Image (cartoon, rainbow, N blue to C red):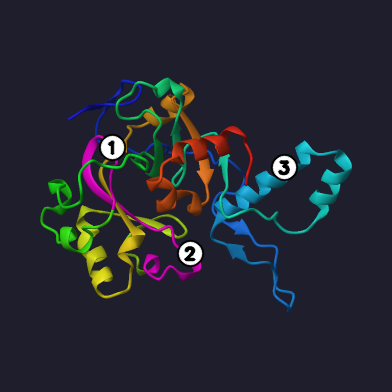
Amino acid sequence: MALPSPAGIAKPSLHLLFNNRRASSSITCCSYNARSSEDGAAPTIDADWRSFRAQLILKEQYSNSVNPAAAAVTAAKPGPAKIADKWAHPLVEPEKGCLLIATKKLDGSHIFERTVILLLSADMGVILNRPSLMSIKEAQSITAETDIAGVFSGRPLFFGGPLEECFFLLGPREAANDVVGRTGLFEEVMPGLHYGMQESVGSAAELVKRGVADMRDFRFFDGFCAWEHEQLRDEVRAGLWRVAACSPPVLGLTSVVKGGLWEEVQELARKRRVW
């Protein structure tokens, strides 16, 4: 079954978007932590390479916005720059864990206008800012064959996209204290943020029942979005989406529920600054 995409291209079954994806910076799998141990050991590697990349971008942006003398002093300081909890910056190409921000070219699209999509993988994601008109109890596609309606009946339900499947996000949580994430039951999107599908809802409910996880850390999506090989890249090049990396706190449920996520991320990405 093929469904229309924002660009009017049919959506067949899922494929990998990039076989040889180019990284958007020279940091691709880890980050450098300038703090070394007291015994002179080499600096440690921080798994959250996205945060380190944001620090590099912040330094570069600052050096380009002030006089050369001040920039030279800042550049000479050891270690990464300090950044706030909430930050976002543009990307050239999509990557796992990034945001797709609908541009004005999608105005008038019933599904995608003013949406913010979180990419769970290279070619698959969920719309973050489309609260559903149905409750979890009323969504039969989610509650079928699970006890989700009992455990998670009070949790928000979102329209995740035009393709049928149940997804849920767990987090964002402090990565250092993310015991649930370290169980390996769910797929990691970025440190402190994980996702699951229909088959793992039972595991999520069991963790809540045992007190290992808080049900308030979960949000559920009825449906998802997907692109075929090269399709998403073509849509980005056509100007349908602005691509941005962001910190986990930007994805907090409070910001999403109260509205304004599209405006907030759009502002951060448009100004090309890290906050």
Q: Residue furthest right?
A: 69
Q: Is residue 247 magenta?
A: no
Mark 3 nearby-residue class (10 Å; few <14, some 14–19, many ≥20): some
Inspect this view and state whether residue 220 appears: yes
Type of amino acid at the residue the image marks with label 1: Gly
Residue 115 position, x and y percent, is: 39, 34
Q: Residue furthest left?
A: 145
The residue where tag 2 is placed is: 175
In the image, 76 versus 131, the foreground residue is 131
The quarter in which the N terminus is drawn is: top left
Type of amino acid at the residue the image marks with label 3: Glu
Q: Secondary structure at mark 3?
A: helix
Q: Residue at x 37, y 41 (%)?
A: 129
Left or right, 274 with respect to 132, comes to right
Mark positioned earlier in the residue sequence (3 or 2): 3
Please determine whether, in this image, residue 50 is positioned above or below residue 17.
below
Mark positioned earlier in the residue sequence (3 or 1): 3
In the image, 234 versus 117, the foreground residue is 117
When asked about the image quadrant of residue 147, the answer is bottom left
Q: Is residue 174 magenta?
A: yes
Res 60 label: 3
The residue where tag 1 is placed is: 161
Q: Residue furthest front?
A: 258
Q: CA distance from mark 3 to mark 1?
A: 36 Å
Left or right, 99 with respect to 62, comes to left
Magenta stretch bounds: 156-182
Q: Residue at x 40, y 58 (%)?
A: 171
